[in-house]
């Protein structure tokens, strides 16, 4: 009985599901941001709404190719799209980038502390090297 409570604690399944969903969301965001064309499209959208043709124009790509990029960005939640007649208007949604930024900030803190430790070790090594040589001649 006790093992069942430990092994099948209801909160654990819920937490694991939440972690998996967050991981999947971050995977989609980073996948979308991995492509330079999509990053450039997001930069263009930072200046305001654009239709898919306007997003495609700087890249000399077809509407279909631009549409595929837009679908990836939309799937990651990085933009929203609305249809006005035959035109698909895209709008930047920055919230997912903030999520990715928070994820990266955690590792930035880790690496900053590691670099601080390395700096201290290198400074100590440099100091020890000077003291072993003795006075300058």
Image (cartoon, rainbow, N blue to C red):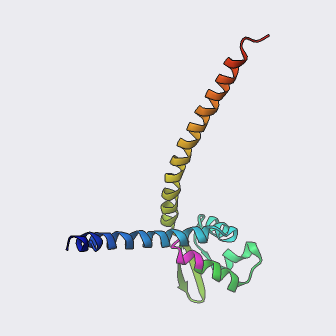
In the image, is 64 to the left or to the right of 19? right
Where does residue 118 sit, x and y in percent of width and height? Answer: 60, 38
In the image, is 23 to the left or to the right of 64? left
Q: Residue at x 67, y 75 (%)?
A: 55
Q: Residue at x 38, y 70 (%)?
A: 16
Quarter of the rendering containing residue 33: bottom right
* Front-lying residue, 80 or 23: 23
Quarter of the rendering containing residue 134: top right
In the image, is 132 to the left or to the right of 23? right
The answer to whether residue 110 is above or below residue 137 is below
Q: Quadrant of the C terminus?
A: top right
In the image, is 116 to the left or to the right of 53? left
> Is residue 92 visible from the viewing direction of this image?
no
* Front-lying residue, 36 or 87: 36
> Is residue 114 visible from the viewing direction of this image?
yes
Where does residue 3 sit, x and y in percent of width and height? Answer: 25, 71
Where does residue 2 sit, x and y in percent of width and height? Answer: 21, 70
Quarter of the rendering containing residue 125: top right
Q: Quadrant of the N terminus?
A: bottom left
* Front-lying residue, 80 or 68: 68
Pick out the residue farthest to the bottom.
86
**Residue range (magenta):** 72-78
Q: Residue at x 73, y 11 (%)?
A: 135
Does the stretch in magenta take in 101?
Answer: no
* Front-lying residue, 129 or 110: 129
Does the stretch in magenta take in 77?
Answer: yes
Pick out the residue farthest to the right.
137
For the image, the number of numbered tags is 0
Q: Residue at x 69, y 70 (%)?
A: 37
The answer to whether residue 15 is above or below residue 68 is above
């Amino acid at each position: 009985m006790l093992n069942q409570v430990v092994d099948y604690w209801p909160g654990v399944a819920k937490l694991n599901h939440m972690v998996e969903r967050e991981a999947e969301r971050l995977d989609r965001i980073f996948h979308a941001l991995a492509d330079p064309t999509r990053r450039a499209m997001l930069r263009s959208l930072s200046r305001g709404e654009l239709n898919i043709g306007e997003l495609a124009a700087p890249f000399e790509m077809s509407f279909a190719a631009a549409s595929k990029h837009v679908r990836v960005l939309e799937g990651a939640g990085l933009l929203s799209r609305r249809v006005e007649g035959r035109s698909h208007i895209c709008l930047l949604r920055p919230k997912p980038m903030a999520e990715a930024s928070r994820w990266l900030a955690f590792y930035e803190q880790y690496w900053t502390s590691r670099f601080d430790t390395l700096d201290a070790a290198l400074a100590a090594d440099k100091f020890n090297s000077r003291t072993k040589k003795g006075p300058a001649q």
